[in-house]
Amino acid sequence: MAYTIRIQGRGDELIYTDAELRLELDRTLSFGHRLYCDNTVHLPLPKRQEIITRLCEHFRTKDEPSIFVMDETDKDREALTTFLNSLTAAGHQLTLEIDSEEKRHAFVQRLAKDTQEIREERYGPDRQLKMF
């Protein structure tokens, strides 16, 4: 079955298309491709495995390391972990990262706080920065 993977915008979005569906996926580029599985949770497990296999093919994970990010509440978490382990055993350079909405929110809050502290240290607490 034919499929396409098209990178959108600055490269943080992927459009996966095959005969059955069109799906927007997220990724980041830090220490390899970081691919997020949370947009596939509504799909049956075999379809999710098919998409992951195609992503591995597209991003040549036998040659380049990639990270699959899965939400800790994912209903297929155990099965997908086993599947990713089988791909790793077959020579793919994959790492699994478990994430959650709470962890992402805490990271954004910490980043905002650190940015504010640096700004205040450099420019003083009362100075407003104009972006444009």
Image: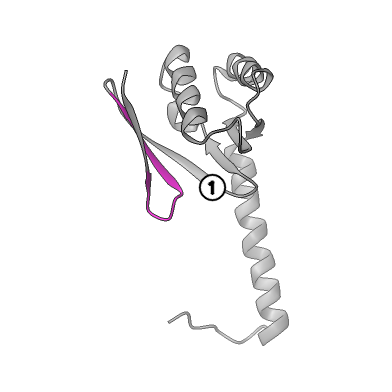
Relative height, residue 88 to residue 117 (above, below): above
Q: Nearer the viewer, residue 96 or 124?
A: 96
Tell me which corner region of the image, top left, top right, bottom left or bottom right, holds residue 113.
Answer: bottom right
Query: In this image, 20 relative to 34: left or right?
Result: left
Q: Which residue is mark 1?
A: 28
Question: What x and y, as percent, mark residue 25?
Answer: 43, 37
Is residue 89 highlighted in magenta? no
Over which residues does the magenta segment extend?
Answer: 7-18
Residue 125 in sight: yes
Q: Which quarter of the figure is the N terminus placed in? A: top left
Relative height, residue 98 to residue 78 (above, below): below
Question: What x and y, as percent, mark residue 81?
Answer: 63, 20
Tell me which corner region of the image, top left, top right, bottom left or bottom right, holds residue 88.
Answer: top right
Question: What amino acid type is highlighted by mark number 1?
Answer: Thr
Q: Residue furthest right?
A: 121
> What residue do we see at 44% from left, 24% from top?
51
Circle 1 packing at 10 Å, graded few (<14), some (14-19), many (20+), is some
SS majority, magenta: strand
Relative height, residue 42 to residue 105 (above, below): above
Question: What x and y, as percent, mark residue 27?
Answer: 50, 43
Is residue 16 highlighted in magenta? yes
Q: Which quarter of the figure is the C terminus placed in? A: bottom left
How many numbered callouts? Answer: 1
> What residue do we see at 65% from left, 69% from top?
115
